[in-house]
Amino acid sequence: MRKKASSVIRVTDEERRILCDMADSMYLNNGVGLAAVQVGIDKQLAVIDIGKGLVKLINPSITKKMGTETQEEGCLSVPDAVVKVKRAKKVTVSFLDENGEVRQITAEGLFARAIQHEVDHLSGKLIVDYLNPIKRLFLKR
């Protein structure tokens, strides 16, 4: 989970199956997002559902950020941690959908935060990386 995930070259039935399995895992664990690297798969895949329907992202790339806000976040990969993270209030993300079509969406609020969180995972970053070194040390204990 500490290295950048590999890009998906071509969207196949395998990627579609992985995305469905990831969504099932996310829902079973009461999450709002899950990146493939969190389940041991080295691919740029993520699923997000903030209660408004499932979104599947392949090779997501944040192309625009607007505003900032700091809020607490949790993570399925670091279950005991709640970390205040400063993120953009609004983002535009480009990605492939499960049919391999290029899409772009602009999100704000929790949806924007979830996108940024999952893109961080795909880039090898965890919420604990937003902590200062002293707080990170106490969290490890």
Image: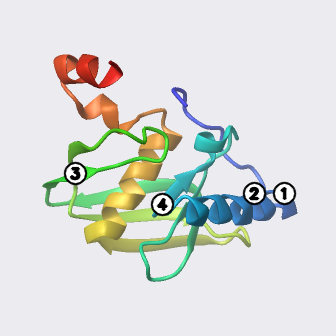
Mark 4, residues whose alpha carbon is within 10 Å: few (<14), some, or many (≥20)? some
Mark 1, residues whose alpha carbon is within 10 Å: few (<14), some, or many (≥20)? few
CA distance for labels 2 and 4: 17 Å
The residue at 69%/62% (across/down) is 19
- Marks 2 and 3: CB-CB under 8 Å? no
Q: Amino acid at mark 2?
A: Ile
Q: Which residue is mark 4?
A: 31
Spot occupied by residue 110 in the image (x, y as percentages of width and height): 30, 67
Q: Which residue is mark 2?
A: 18
- 27 vs 40, nearest the viewer: 27
Q: Identify the element where label 3 is drawn.
A: strand
| Residue 11 appears in the rendering | no
Spot occupied by residue 49 in the image (x, y as percentages of width and height): 49, 71
Asked if residue 17 lies left or right of residue 103, the reply is right
Which badge, 2 or 3, comes first in the chain's sequence?
A: 2
Image quadrant assignment for residue 134 = top left
Spot occupied by residue 96 in the image (x, y as percentages of width and height): 62, 65
